[in-house]
């Protein structure tokens, strides 16, 4: 093939050059240089198959040795560098190609060859790098500018206050360890989960996403962009792992409560998968964070010359769905047993995509379904903490601030559970619906609302009914709390400080013996209130649960106000692990309900009475194991299981509860070094 190539392509070109003295003379380029450049150009057009490049190099070198010698004596050194298995020929001018014997991630992980975001699109295609880098191609100058801006920002942040840069510095150190030695990284994380979950996950991960363009060093995961339409099926094979168990995918449109962060949202998928490894023991070699970059509507990012993503407005409508469809088809074609967790998609798409895929693929939406289960467990915990029986749950009066993907997910799950407890009839459903008051950016949602969001419509209150309660369409949160005197005030609004002094003062009038306050929005600055505010204004007897971690509050006299972390991290790892190990065809409502009930029952009576309604994060591996076992049990019950590896469906059906737990435990990855043995391919 090589000889054929030289005879047919290179030699005719060389002949042409030799006979066109005048053209080279006019352009001021010597014939020798021009000839050499023809050879070099020809290298670029040869398919980069490793074996071929070796032969091409040999043939080309012998063909042109005379030319090269002459050039060497005239123009300086020709360096032939041998770098551990990869040979690189370059002249001092730096315009000659470097021959590499590597591809894909091996290039990105090799400091000699890596150019990061500066790889051109042609190189990305030819070196199997497509999808392994953020879509924007940067010049070396832009790369340096981005790096320097990041350095300067760190200095500036250090001046402004110690808290954030300290956490970011820890994130950087951990991230470097993650790049060098995954086993050690996860050992550090698992052994110190309480200390480092807030760094690799919420809340620091939010800051990391905001500053991602500066922090970006080595890519992790895959990037599919709107510009990759039609190519995803082949791109997915650029990922080096033969098996992938868990994908977390985001389109970056609603990262925590921080809004549209575009391509920078990849950080959230990485953080979630860190918990999959640390809490669920998913093998880190088989996880894949994915960013689908369909543009951004964040005007600042659209103008930022150092932004790493597509600088165009987000795709919408059918075009958007086509991109997500193509991605789903590609990953499920390559890895038919993978589970895909959708994360931080704006509400507009979160529900639609969930409905579109949930019956066909093994997928779930963490913000809608994981959050719903965690909140439900918290609501049931609040009933228990009042010393009331669970059956009293349908009597709870619940005010929810926020009617987005998370709020509506929680409302649907809570109403369904109440309705079931009341007998699962239409009347029960109607009665359950009357236990909720939903306030969004425009105030209390009633049937009088114009242009009501379809997902929120079934929670809109009847006008007459709320008028009797002294309320009206659009009433403020404080008014609603004052009139309703709820048992629970739950925030999924992404508005920091929304539970103001006025709102919390109003909650003091709650008829509950232990009102529950759940400021679930993330990260910390978006929490609807702090525990100090809640305990000091409403009283020591409250139940408190926040999305981001806070320290317990010293109430004086040796009493502690307990801060629960009401975060979907207590469910999603177990839902994923249970689905994987059961080989369930889909993630059913029953499996999600079983997960939530398992979490609700996890705390002892004594703990609950002390106001501890969620486990501490130091127990996350244990609760995840329990949740996974509950999910598997339900999947078996619903006859959805197809099995996992040697545990086929028939064997699964034979397992009792303890055996299911042991099965889960035995299949969780631990961060221990494996013995390595070299074997030639
Ligand atoms: N703790 C957890 O596990 C968890 C899980 C999922 C989401 N969240 C958090 O929940 C928040 C919301 O997420 P989402 O996906 O539902 O977002 P979203 O943007 O879809 O919804 C936000 C909702 O809040 C409403 N809102 C805005 N301003 C308001 C105000 N002043 N008063 C009352 N409501 C107001 C909006 O109208 C909207 O209905 C985010 O901060 C996210 O981090 C937490
Ligand atoms: O990521 C988290 O910490 C929880 C949740 O998924 C969120 O979007 O806020
Ligand atoms: Mg989320």
Image: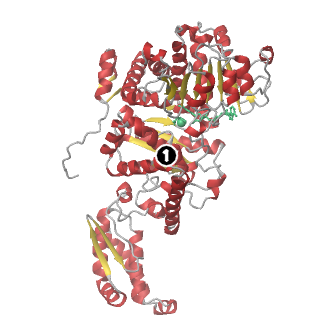
Colour setting: secondary structure
Tell me the quarter of the image containing the N terminus. Answer: bottom left
Question: Dot 1 lies on which element?
Answer: helix
Q: Which residue is mark 1?
A: 267
- The residue at the point 47 percent across, 52 percent down is 131
Instruction: List x then y, in percent, for residue 446.
Output: 76, 23
| Marker count (numbered) | 1
Image check: 295 left or right of 646? right
Tell me if residue 367 comes above or below residue 422 in the rendering: below
Tell me if residue 366 comes above or below residue 127 in the rendering: above
Viewer can see residue 243 = no
Q: Quadrant of residue 82?
A: bottom left
Tell me if residue 565 comes above or below residue 594 in the rendering: below
Viewer can see residue 126 = yes
Q: Quadrant of residue 301?
A: bottom right
- The residue at the point 61 percent across, 59 percent down is 304
Instruction: List x then y, in percent, for residue 286.
Output: 36, 40
10 Å crowding of disc 1: few (<14), some (14-19), many (20+): many
């Amino acid at each position: 093939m090589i000889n054929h190539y030289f005879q047919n392509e290179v030699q005719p070109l060389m002949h042409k050059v030799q006979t066109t003295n005048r053209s080279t003379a006019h352009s001021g380029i010597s014939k020798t240089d021009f000839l050499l450049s023809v050879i070099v150009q020809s290298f670029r057009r040869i398919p980069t198959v490793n074996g071929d490049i070796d032969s091409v190099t040999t043939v080309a070198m012998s063909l042109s040795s005379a030319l090269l010698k002459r050039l060497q004596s005239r123009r300086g050194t020709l360096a032939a560098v041998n770098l551990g298995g990869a040979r690189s020929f370059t002249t001092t001018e730096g315009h000659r190609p470097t021959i590499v014997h590597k591809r894909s991630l091996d290039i990105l992980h090799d400091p000699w060859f890596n150019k990061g975001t500066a790889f051109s699109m042609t190189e990305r295609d030819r070196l199997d790098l497509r999808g392994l880098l953020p879509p924007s191609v940067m010049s070396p100058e832009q790369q340096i500018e981005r790096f320097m801006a990041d350095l300067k920002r760190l200095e500036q942040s250090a001046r402004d206050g110690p808290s954030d840069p300290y956490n970011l510095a820890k994130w950087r150190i951990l991230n470097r360890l993650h790049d060098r030695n995954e086993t050690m990284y996860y050992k550090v994380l698992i052994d110190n989960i309480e200390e480092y979950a807030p760094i690799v996950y919420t809340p620091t991960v939010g800051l990391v996403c905001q500053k991602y363009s500066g922090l970006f060093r080595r890519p992790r995961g895959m990037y599919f962009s709107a510009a990759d339409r039609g190519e995803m099926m082949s791109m997915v094979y650029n990922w080096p792992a033969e098996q992938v168990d868990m994908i977390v995918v985001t389109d970056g449109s609603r990262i925590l409560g921080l809004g549209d962060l575009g391509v920078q949202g990849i950080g959230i998928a990485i953080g979630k998968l860190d918990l999959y490894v640390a809490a669920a023991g998913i093998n880190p070699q088989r996880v894949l964070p994915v960013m689908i970059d369909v543009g951004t509507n964040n005007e600042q990012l659209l103008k930022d010359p150092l932004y790493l993503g597509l600088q165009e407005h987000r795709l919408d409508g059918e075009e958007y769905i086509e991109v997500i469809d193509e991605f789903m088809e590609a990953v499920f074609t390559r890895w038919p047993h993978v589970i895909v967790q959708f994360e931080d998609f704006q509400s507009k798409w979160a529900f639609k995509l969930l409905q579109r895929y949930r019956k066909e693929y093994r997928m779930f939406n963490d913000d809608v379904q994981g959050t719903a289960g965690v909140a439900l467990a918290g609501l049931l915990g609040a009933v228990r903490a009042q010393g009331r029986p669970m059956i009293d749950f349908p009597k709870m009066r619940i005010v929810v601030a926020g009617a987005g993907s998370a709020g509506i997910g929680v409302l649907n799950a809570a109403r369904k559970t109440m309705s079931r407890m009341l007998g699962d009839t239409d009347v029960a459903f109607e009665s359950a619906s009357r236990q909720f008051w939903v306030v969004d950016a425009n105030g209390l949602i009633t049937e009088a609302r114009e242009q009501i969001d379809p997902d929120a419509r079934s929670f809109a209150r009847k006008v007459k009914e709320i008028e009797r309660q002294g309320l009206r369409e659009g009433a403020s949160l404080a008014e609603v709390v004052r009139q309703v005197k709820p048992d629970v005030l739950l925030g999924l609004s992404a508005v920091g400080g929304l539970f103001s002094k006025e709102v919390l003062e109003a909650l003091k009038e709650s008829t509950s013996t232990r009102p529950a306050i759940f400021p679930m929005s993330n990260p910390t600055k978006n929490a609807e209130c702090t525990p100090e505010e809640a305990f000091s204004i409403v009283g020591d007897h409250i139940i408190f649960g926040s999305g981001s971690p806070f320290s317990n509050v010293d109430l004086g006299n040796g009493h502690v106000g307990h801060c629960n972390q009401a975060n979907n991290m207590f469910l999603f790892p177990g839902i994923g692990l249970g689905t994987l190990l059961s080989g369930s065809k889909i993630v059913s409502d029953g499996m999600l309900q079983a997960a939530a009930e398992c979490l609700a029952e996890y705390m002892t009576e004594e703990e609950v009475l002390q106001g501890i309604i969620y486990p501490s994060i130091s127990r996350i591996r244990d609760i995840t194991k329990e949740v996974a076992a509950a999910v598997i049990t339900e999947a078996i019950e619903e006859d959805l299981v197809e099995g996992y590896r040697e545990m086929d469906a028939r064997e699964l059906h034979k397992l009792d509860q303890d055996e299911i737990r042991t099965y889960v435990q035995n299949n969780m990855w631990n961060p221990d070094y494996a013995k390595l043995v070299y074997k030639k391919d």
